[in-house]
């Protein structure tokens, strides 16, 4: 089954907690703190696998949680790092944030890797907080929670050439003739319900990937028929073969040609600018010569290259493939080849500190650094809270709250946690 859309939930592993412990050995009085640091949690990492063809697996398994990091131990022992969880995606997958459709990463290269959800940092053990004036710290940090996200996966096929046309114009018959693809072929509309890919070998050293896109109809840009389900697959093609049925007396090939090109333009302006070859199909049914000449003349006046073919008998198909390979070579020679880029979302956000007033007695503090500091503090430990207060002083949070008129007893919300302001 071909599936080209899915929604998933990913979560990086939580960081391990730092250890609160002291060295206790015979004949070693006042051994001092020896709590080790927690380890970072694993991240959820997308890996492009050319052997994966669809997003079907993600409809059955929509949640991917990386393992947590291990807690710190005595004698400054560090926890075990959480292993990264690899999620294998097909080439051409676009990953978007579910809440706003913002593109997280576009996966177009085999082997490309991208971090989808970062694992949390490990908390520091109490040995980390020992100083000349604080010889026996009785607190340690908690591990940072891993990043949690809801994502939308959208697969856009990577093909050199896309077959475009109304239902039953012969697209499936053509791809079945020129490649090893075996789509369903029948004499009723919308026989093809999923895109089909085939590798076409023109001659030694010349080949291309052809995509048979299910029949589009008028209104496809609004979702009519299969609509947006398949228009997205046209975006990555470099050349379009527009197939027209020139034998059916009830159809107007020129009107069909204009209608589908208008749908491409309404969906995405750039699609209407892609180069096209026009295949006049079903000439084995012997349409009138004057009708063929009229259609060819009108299309050539619009700058289109036309080829008469019969997908059923193979007549003219070789000429069409030769012209297709020639156009692709011309397009390739005019392109500037750039090295493949691996887009990896940054693993560290940099949201600045913001302090604002909610009402007379409530304040809101935002900022990645300050929110992380609160999350990693054991708020049930008085000494840990005093250490947090000193950190907030150094960050400038206390100063800004005072400038906004905060007084003792006011509520201060930092991330999802509410604290009481105190001097």
Image: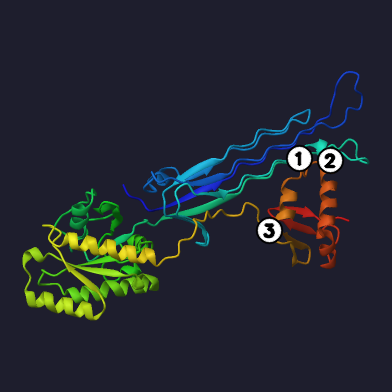
The crowd level at tag 2 (other Cα within 10 Å; few <14, some 14-19, many 20+) is some
Residue 27 coordinates in the image, percent (x, y): 91, 19
| Residue that mark 3 sits on | 350
Q: In this view of the protein, which residue sits in the foreground, 311 or 67? A: 311
Residue 318 is left or right of residue 71, and the answer is: left
Q: In this view of the protein, which residue sits in the foreground, 372 or 159? A: 159
The image quadrant where one finds the C terminus is: bottom right
Q: In this view of the protein, which residue sits in the foreground, 132 or 62? A: 132
Which numbered dot is residue 124?
A: 1
Residue in the image at 87% along x and 31% along y: 32
Cα separation, mark 1 vs mark 2, equals 8 Å
Lower sequence index among marks 1 and 3: 1
- Whether residue 163 appears in this view of the structure is no
Cα separation, mark 1 vs mark 3, equals 22 Å
Mark 1, secondary structure of its residue = loop
Instruction: Answer whether labels 3 and 2 touch (C-beta < 8 Å).
Output: no
Residue 161 coordinates in the image, percent (x, y): 30, 61
Residue 306 coordinates in the image, percent (x, y): 20, 71
Lower sequence index among marks 3 and 2: 2
**Quadrant in the picture for residue 263:** bottom left
Residue 71 is left or right of residue 23, and the answer is: left
Mark 3, secondary structure of its residue = loop
Instruction: Answer whether labels 1 and 2 touch (C-beta < 8 Å).
Output: yes
Q: In this view of the protein, which residue sits in the foreground, 45 or 22? A: 45
**Quadrant in the picture for residue 222:** bottom left
Instruction: Answer whether labels 1 and 3 touch (C-beta < 8 Å).
Output: no
Mark 2, secondary structure of its residue = helix
Residue 173 coordinates in the image, percent (x, y): 18, 56
């Amino acid at each position: 089954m071909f599936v080209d859309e899915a929604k998933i939930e990913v979560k990086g592993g939580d960081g391990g907690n730092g250890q609160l412990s002291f060295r206790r050995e015979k004949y070693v009085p006042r051994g001092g703190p020896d709590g080790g640091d927690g380890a970072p949690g694993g991240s959820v990492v997308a890996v492009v696998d050319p052997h994966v063809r669809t997003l079907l697996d993600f409809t059955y398994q929509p949640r991917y949680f990386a393992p947590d990091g291990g807690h710190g131990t005595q004698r400054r022992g560090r926890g075990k790092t959480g292993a990264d969880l690899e999620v294998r995606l097909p080439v051409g997958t676009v990953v978007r944030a579910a809440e706003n459709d913002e593109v997280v990463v576009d996966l177009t290269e085999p082997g490309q890797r991208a971090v989808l959800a970062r694992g949390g940092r490990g908390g520091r053990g109490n040995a980390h907080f020992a100083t000349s004036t604080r010889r026996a710290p009785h607190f340690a940090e908690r591990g940072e929670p891993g990043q949690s996200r809801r994502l939308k996966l959208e697969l856009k096929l990577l093909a050199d050439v896309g077959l475009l046309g109304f239902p039953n114009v012969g697209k499936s018959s053509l791809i079945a003739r020129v490649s090893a693809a075996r789509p369903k072929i029948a004499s009723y509309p919308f026989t093809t319900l999923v895109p089909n890919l085939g590798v076409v070998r023109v001659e030694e050293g010349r080949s291309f990937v052809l995509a048979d896109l299910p029949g589009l109809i008028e209104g496809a840009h609004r979702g009519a028929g299969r609509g947006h389900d398949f228009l997205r697959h046209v975006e990555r093609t470099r050349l379009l073969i527009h197939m027209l049925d020139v034998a059916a007396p009830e159809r107007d090939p020129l009107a069909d040609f204009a209608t589908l090109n208008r749908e491409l333009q309404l969906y995405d302006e750039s699609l209407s600018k892609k180069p096209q070859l026009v295949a006049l199909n079903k000439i084995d049914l012997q349409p009138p010569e004057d009708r063929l000449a009229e259609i060819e003349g009108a299309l050539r006046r619009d700058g289109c290259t036309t080829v008469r073919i019969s997908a059923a008998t193979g007549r003219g198909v070789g000429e069409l493939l030769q012209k297709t390979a020639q156009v692709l070579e011309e397009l390739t020679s005019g392109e500037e080849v750039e090295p493949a880029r691996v887009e990896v979302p940054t693993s560290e956000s940099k949201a600045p500190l913001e302090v604002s007033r909610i009402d007379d007695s409530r304040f809101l503090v935002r900022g990645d650094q300050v929110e992380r500091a609160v999350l990693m503090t054991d708020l049930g430990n008085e000494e840990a809270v005093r250490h947090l207060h000193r950190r907030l002083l150094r960050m400038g949070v206390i100063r800004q709250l005072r400038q906004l008129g905060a007084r003792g007893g006011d509520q201060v919300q930092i991330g999802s946690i509410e604290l009481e302001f105190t001097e």
